[in-house]
Image (spheres, coloured by chain):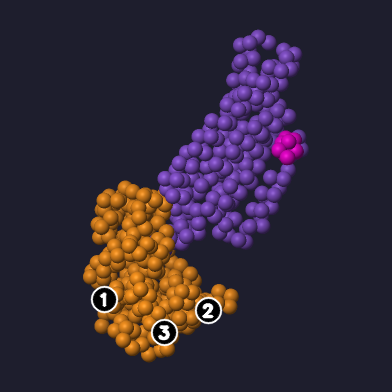
Chain colours: A purple, B orange
Amino acid sequence: MDLVQQLLYMLQGISTTLLISIFSFLLGLTIGLPLAFIRTYERGFAVFVDAFEKVFRGIPELVLMLLFYRGVGLFLAFPFGDAFFTATFVLGLRSAANQSQIFKGAIRGVGEEQMVAARSLGLSRLQSILRVMIPQVFIFSTPGLGSEYALLVKDSSYAFVIGVPVIMEQADRIRKATYDPVIPYIVAAILYILLTFPLATWLDTWGSRKKKQLGL
Amino acid sequence: MAEIVMECKNLWKTYGKIIAVKDVSFQIREGEIKLVFGPSGSGKSTFLRCLAMLTIPDKGDVYLRDQCLTKPSVDLNKARAKIGFVFQHIWLFRHLTALGNVELSLRRVLKMPKDEAREKAMEALRLVKMEDWAKHYPAQMSGGQQQRVGIARALARNPNIILLDEPTSALDPELTGEVIDTLRDLARMGTTMLIVSHEMPFAREVADEMIFYDEGAIVETGPPELFFTNPESERAKKFMARLIKKTKRE
């Protein structure tokens, strides 16, 4: 395996890692944000939301991925026969459980008062959530969302056990081809840091500045 | 006599053992200014919130003009759009500018087109003398300025009545004056207002009626002069004496 080919391998690894991280982050956001509001405002559903969070935060990603890919995939080849989909799906649900917790804290931080003030104007509950709560909830959640994204980039490496060409998988393939047990992993480590650190830090800084500016 | 704008009949609200509103009946007519005062923790805020249906009363009825708000079929969002509410701790939307705060209900509740809403909101900000601060965020304003924006937010959509829950009591003493001035302007315009406040000179000046509220109930009502000279109930007498002493000390 020549250097150009190794480079191409790694490039594919980077793009796959980014795609899994971004899609699972968005899936987590789409499920986690409504869950947090349901948890806060519909007490009757709290048990279900809590159960969902416990299950997906409690089971190791590795177990979930193998369970869905090998187990569920056996019966439901579509869509769980697809390793990329399964990895994104599993990490997305896990992230939904985490993000639900992050947003729940942020909703508490923004405060019930903002909701009361919004309702006093005649805004419906949904309008109040969309126009008043969510913009502030996001600012409150930036540090948590930054580390959640970093977590996803790192945890996407687990997808290598089901053969998804993430950075980890590619590094392993290069190691097998070149018999070099050190350099491929070091390159992988550096790539993971580059993919997580800047965005998480930027989000954190931006959020703190915004919070200070708005007096949140 | 002017039309009754808001009315409640035999209103009740309890929190566990605490009775915040105990069989309260009350009405206010177009253009009237009534002022509620009484010891803290007596349930004044809860009473005001029940009138705005921000807190749902346990029993009794609330009417806004001819509409009974306590009927289950009522669209409370539509009803609240016609009631202005000003909070003790202001509660401006911190992610929106002064203009954004005032505009929100015009755009999303009254569904005004953008330009019209902007114009209306600026008009309300002019009324509270905050038009130069339209582009500023709440965090950049003083407490008094924030509360004036809070008042603009409540009155921008021309509500039938404005309920004000201790609008000056969370402010530094030197900032209450500007808010009182704004309320004086509203009074001159004939705005129907129910105000919880202990600003006695202001009350004497603008209130048509004062309401002494204690332990979840209206104890005594009457013109300001009555309370300043010779209130009937013992409790009101004691409270007024304390209040006047405190005002003098300040």
Q: Quadrant of the N terminus of chain B?
A: bottom left
Amino acid type at mark 2: Ile
Q: Chain of mark 1?
A: B
Q: Residues within 10 Å of mark 2 (few under 14, many from 20)?
A: some
Tell me which residue sits at (48%, 80%) in the image. B216
On the image, the x and y values in percent for residue B177 come to 30, 65
Q: Position of residue A40 (x, y in %)?
A: 57, 57
Q: Earlier in the sequence, mark 1 or mark 3?
A: 1
Question: What residue sits right under mark 1 in the picture?
Answer: B205
* Most distant residue in the bottom direction: B232
Q: Nearer the viewer, residue B186 or A122?
A: B186
Q: Confirm whether the magenta stretch covers residue B214.
A: no
Image quadrant holding the C terminus of chain B, namely bottom left
Q: Is circle 3 on the same chain as circle 2?
A: yes
> Is any part of residue B8 visible from this angle?
no
Q: Nearer the viewer, mark 3 or mark 2?
A: 3
Q: Where on the picture, by quarter, is residue A56? A: top right
The first of marks 3 and 2 along the sequence is 2
Q: Is residue B203 left or right of residue A53?
A: left
Real-space Cα distance between discs 3 and 2?
A: 22 Å
Q: Secondary structure at mark 1?
A: helix
Foreground label between 2 and 1: 1
Using the image, tell me which numbered label, if any, was put on residue B238.
Answer: 3
Say if labels 1 and 3 share a chain: yes
Q: Is residue B110 above or below residue B82?
A: above
Identify residue type, mark 1. Glu
Q: Along the line of sight, which residue is nearer the eye, B198 or A140?
A: B198
C-alpha separation, residue under disc 2 versus residue under disc 1: 32 Å
Rendered location of residue A105, percent (x, y): 57, 51
> Is A177 positioned to the left or the right of B87 in the image?
right
Q: Which residues are magenta?
A: A60-69
Classify residue B13 as left or right of residue A20.
left
